[in-house]
Amino acid sequence: MRKYFGRGWLRKVYSAVCEYALRWLAVLPAKKNKVVFDNFGGRGFGCDPKYIALELLRSEEALDLVWLARDLTEEFPPGIRPVKYGGARALYELATAGVWVDNFKSAMRVPKKEEQYYIQTWHSSLGLKKNERDAAQLDRSYVKRARKDAAATDLMYSNNGFREEKYRKRFWYNGEVLRCGHPRNAVLMRPPEAVRNMVRGAYGLEADTRILLYAPTFRSRADREVYRFCAGPCLKACEKRFGGKYVCFERLHPNVADLVSEAEEGDRVREVTDYPDMQELMAAADLLVTDYSGSMFEFMLTGKPVFLLAKDLNEYVEEERELYFSFDELPFPAARSEEELACRILSFDAGKYREECRDFMERTDMREDGRGAEVIAHIILEKIK
């Protein structure tokens, strides 16, 4: 009996069912006006796909906009149809879409038809950490998935020459790289007061309360301690240097969201990892503290201060990722402890900071106009028509 009903038998049955399903999906016709969006494998309404979808809604065209989501209880704007990520229905939506929009090289994918158009938005506009072919170690299964994703992709885009070159040479990608703004950055270039009020209201802040946003990147180690931030000295330094009352918003990377714990230091620290849109948090924040996250380059566009807290710099570079830029090449004041960071805040020179940010943007050929959503939405509408 084990010969016929062991694990090998189950694998064969599973493979046969998957092969049949893919063949069935392959013959389904694509609907030109259907656009399917995915953000970090169903992690909510955010990043570039969100702002492209909102721009398409404003077009008032007859579109079927589908969002693949793990949590179907999340609220979506009228006109966007959520579908459970990872299920048979999601595969059906992908197979019958005219356009795919994804910021992540998802393992959930159906064979792409010739008439379908795939935009890979990626989730970093510049990036500090080496990735894709530049990364020292990559899992074989990821490389296989990345190559397959690149072969299916029709369009990538970048707001800077540095990343444009990486897309062309280091992402296994041979298609078009468009120079345009990143859709999610419009809210940073021209932050609506309504967004700031919405974020403050979500966490019960008074109108005059200022926000220090702490947003570290992820490590492969499942250790809460490496993300611990003693906010007290830095909040006091912010109040002394910039004035007003400050609170700390702490946001962990989606890859380590399960390490979220109750925020400490009373009502001065708020845990905001579950807030769906990092761009809105940055638009509302008055100051960013991060370590190696590419969010530093997006927050820079606001003109507000970015500070780096790299307590494990040597270990991170040796054990996790090498960096494209040394800290000396970056325009952001850096520290190795909270006490040193507080000193950097107190001695912050706004004029010098603005000048160094301009120089860095020139060196990386960064041009951001906040109109990326309009550009990409126009391309999608042209493909549909």
Image (tube, helix red, strand yellow):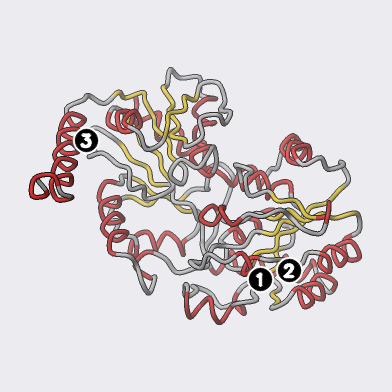
Label ID, residue 331: 1
| Residue 312: percent from left, percent from top | 60, 77
Along the horizontal axis of the image, is 348 left or right of 24?
A: right
Residue in the image at 33% along x and 48% along y: 107
Decide which of tag 2 and tag 1 comes sooner along the chain.
1
The residue beneath circle 3 is 113
145 relative to 167 in the view: left or right:
left
Q: Quadrant of residue 77?
A: top right
Residue 247 is situated, as x and y percent measured from the top left of the image, at: 82, 54
Going by the numbered disc 3, the residue's amino acid type is Lys
- Return the x and y of residue 363 as percentages of the image width and height: 55, 69
Mark 1 closeness class: few <14, some 14–19, many ≥20 residues within 10 Å: many
Q: Nearer the viewer, residue 265 or 351?
A: 265
Q: Earlier in the sequence, mark 2 or mark 3?
A: 3
Element assignment for label 1: loop
Per the model, the C-alpha gap separating discs 1 and 3 is 45 Å
The CA span between labels 2 and 1 is 7 Å
Question: Label 1 amino acid?
Answer: Pro
Q: Which image quadrant: the N terminus?
A: top left
> Can you give x and y, in whole percent of width and height, for residue 325 in the image?
53, 74
Circles 2 and 3 in contact, beta carbons < 8 Å: no
Residue 353: give its label.
2
Left or right relative to 351: residue 383? left
> Are the residues tagged 2 and 1 within 8 Å (C-beta)?
yes
Q: Residues within 10 Å of mark 3 (few under 14, many from 20)?
A: some
278, 241: nearer the viewer:
278
- For the residues carrying marks 1 and 3, which lies nearer the camera in this image? 3
